[in-house]
Amino acid sequence: MYPARALFLYQIVKNGVCVYEKEPYERIKFESQALSLYYDNEHLRNIYHSYLQRSFKEGDYGYRQKPA
């Protein structure tokens, strides 16, 4: 899925408070899937972060590249 979604779900599991739980199995299943998605997408987030930092350093953040 999308790395942003994975990060959002991770934050829910990490910082969220379970208010009501009908079936503990469902909560555990959700948390397992969210953490799995987060760690599966970690490499993509690292690549995105490195490109973003590079574009800030080079001063071309927000500018489109000219077609070759």
Image (cartoon, rainbow, N blue to C red):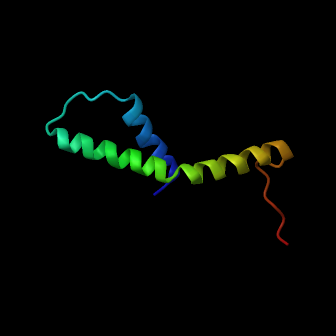
Q: Position of residue 48 (x, y in %)?
A: 65, 51
Is residue 31 found left or right of 66 in the rendered image? left
Q: Position of residue 11 (x, y in %)?
A: 44, 35
Q: In what quadrant of the picture does the N terminus appear?
A: bottom left
Is residue 38 found left or right of 33 in the rendered image? right
Where residue 16 sits, quadrant-wise, is top left
Is residue 64 found left or right of 12 in the rendered image? right
Position of residue 42 relative to residue 20, above or below, is: below
Q: Residue furthest left?
A: 22
Q: Is residue 5 visible?
A: no
Give the camera-side residue of 25 and 68. Answer: 25
| Residue under the point 79% across and 53% down | 63
| Total number of numbered discs in the rendering | 0
Is residue 61 found left or right of 25 in the rendered image? right
Give the camera-side residue of 28 and 51. Answer: 28
Q: Is residue 35 visible?
A: yes
Where residue 67 sits, quadrant-wise, is bottom right
Q: Position of residue 22 (x, y in %)?
A: 14, 37
| Residue under the point 85% across and 47% down | 58
Q: Position of residue 28 (x, y in %)?
A: 25, 41
Q: In what quadrant of the picture does the C terminus appear?
A: bottom right
Q: Residue furthest bottom?
A: 68
